[in-house]
Amino acid sequence: MSDETETLTRFAPDSGTEVALPVHTDLLRLATAGSVDDGKSTLVGRLLHDTKSVLADQLDAVHRASADRGLSTPDLSLLVDGLRAEREQGITIDVAYRYFATGKRTFVLADTPGHVQYTRNTVTGASTAQLAVLLVDARKGVVEQTRRHAAVLALLGVPRLVLAINKIDMVDFDESVHTAIAQDFARHARALGYSDENVVTVPVSALHGDNVVERSERTPWYEGPALLEHLETVPVAPDPHDAPFRLPVQYVIRPRTAEHPDYRGYAGQVAAGVVNEGDEVVVLPGGARSRVSMVDTPDGPAQSAAAGRSVTVLLEDDLDIARGDVIVAADNQPSVTDEFDATVCWLAEKPLSPRAKVLIKHGARTVQAMATELATRFDEQELSSVDAPERLELNEIGKVRFRTSESLPIDEYAASRRTGSFIVLDPSDGSTLAAGLIGVPLAPLASAVTR
Amino acid sequence: MDQNLDLPEDPATSEAPPQVDNLDALESEAIHIFREVAGEFDRPVILFSGGKDSTVLLHLALKAFRPAPVPFPLLHVDTGHNFEEVLQFRDELVSRHDLRLVVARVQDWIDDGRLSERPDGTRNPLQTQPLLEAIEQNRFDAVFGGGRRDEERARAKERVFSLRDSFGQWDPRRQRPELWNLYNGKHRAGEHMRVFPLSNWTELDVWRYIQREKIELAKLYYAHRREVFYRDGMWLTSGPWGGPREDEDVHEKTVRYRTVGDGSCTGAVESEAYTVDDVIAEVAASHLTERGATRADDRMSEAAMEDRKREGYF
């Protein structure tokens, strides 16, 4: 609690701060991960504050709420724990999304709780993250939980990791502590498939602000960037533009107006690659071939559109195309199949049993499916692998074979996070049961086992 | 470990730097959400208050389906204490884009006794019942709202697709995980989905988008002279919602609104921001959130927003 008082006074906004107006910024989606006491909320709080994302009335509310509880010092967790139950129990229950911006970049941060239900929350936060910040306590170094989190981040294909070695002040800013932890983590990250340039280690004190926004004079031996500096400058590679073109058709736009009597456009968000006017394409699963006659965007026709943009594509031929179909590059097509292996992160309390009937939503198509075989379950507690498990339970990860009622055009998750992913739904009540990654070997998890 | 500042250039990005502009990314995400709902639901509706977030929402819907018209009607819950400028603006937009407008009136519920006026005079919390009845009567199965997660900490927990039970209730502990951009639209009869395409936008993003797209707003978002009186730290407009009381003096001030809602609890801020550019500079420099500055209803209790959302409020 005394820690938080100090943090809070430091968090009081300055008056009359000069504000740089963001002009043209890009967007970085990131997730946090770490154990309960690693100081994650303090770090998130500091990032929010120092980028002026915590405002005076929000701080006032924390002061008031703390006083109402009879606390003599403000409880900073009230700033981020948004739900009544979270504040009552003093824990974070659910993923929350936070926003901050600097003159260079806008950030969407998935703030995931650190308690036992790590897989469910880490998977949710990691599914859209371009970078993850993993926290460790400098006094404890890399622990099992760090390894598990890193394995899940690797499995979900988060391209870049930052290891924030927090509470560096508690080890007297000792370089050798930092070096030992950094090397330990680097070994682990390499085993998970990360190249060294995609992993950065920063010694920080979230409480005192060392190396969070500004480089600290108390770590003269550290030559790298402060955490925020790194977040502002790390290249954002949202989706590889050299990947083959994929467009899951969400909706068919047919105005049938006097102005547009023949307009028939296939609307969707480009999932991978680039589409150009004149490109030869194939519509799957049917297989009809045509050419792109127009790439229409929210701002009107364009020569081309890249991954991430919501567009409407018009074709030269009059084909029967509906929601759920996928328009792809003719020279580089996904496989079309009704049977495939996937890595599944089970997110529901109701377990998965072999031969269970489920629904699979892949792109804009939802089909009936059956889990024909549970091949492997990764045991996160024991850090071991179990063959032919009887079921997959909440927070468990396993390899499952699915058979679907209709063929799906699928890519490997490793090649395309968008067209290689799916969600598993409960046919009875529609709830979301699992996250699915097509064809992914359990390599990251296996390496966590072998360490 | 070496700190790697000179990362190898990605061949795909070095040729033509595809700067993923923040607003483009948010726009594409919102449009994707609109089209998912159009594809998966039978009877969606856009909740429309005439405020800046609803106006941006409508602008995005127009872009998502162009050159075809927006395939959804609008639903406005009229508290009976709305600003005249906002109602006029609403009606102009509806007729300009040839939209269908459904209005649920709190006044009707008060007149026939189904709801009674609150002692504090605010009608904001009274919107929930008429809203839920309008959803039920029209059998709307997806209801778009302009809510953003940056507005309030309970909203920070809200999903983009947020399932409501047959009583319209939100249960924050039973939310579905939201993975990649695969939104789960499954729901049972009687349940409906609240959908928030602006979830990942901040107040500043909204204003920068208004600037970029030259979106016209209700005039009271910009500085103007107005007769106001001071109550609970806010400048309120005189009106049928009660006020000024005998001990409250009326002043003429140059003000603008950061949010528009029920007149009884939505305050103006003193401002000289006459243009979008002025507003952006003002918002960027403000030390108060828009709700903290001008919304009395959120101050009622620590969990005011969460409690209202649980009951079915937006």
Image (tube, coloured by chain):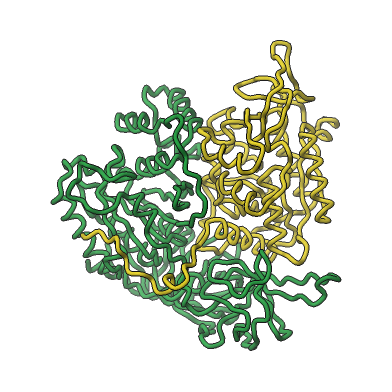
Q: Is residue A81 at least partly visible in the picture?
A: no
- Residue found 63% across the figure and 24% down from its top: B234
> Chain B is which colour?
yellow
Q: Position of residue B223 (x, y in %)?
A: 68, 33
Q: Is residue A102 above or below residue B179?
A: above
Q: Position of residue B79 (x, y in %)?
A: 76, 35
Q: Is residue A437 above or below residue B185?
A: below
The reply, left or right, for residue A373 in relation to residue B101 is left
Question: In the picture, which chain is green?
Answer: A
- Residue found 34% across the figure and 29% down from its top: A5
Q: Who is closer to the viewer here, B44 or A366?
A: B44
Q: Position of residue B38 (x, y in %)?
A: 70, 63
Q: Who is closer to the viewer here, B253 or B124?
A: B253
Residue B247 sits in quarter: top right
- Residue found 44% across the figure and 45% down from its top: A93
Residue A17 sits in quarter: top left
- Quarter occupied by the N terminus of chain B: bottom left
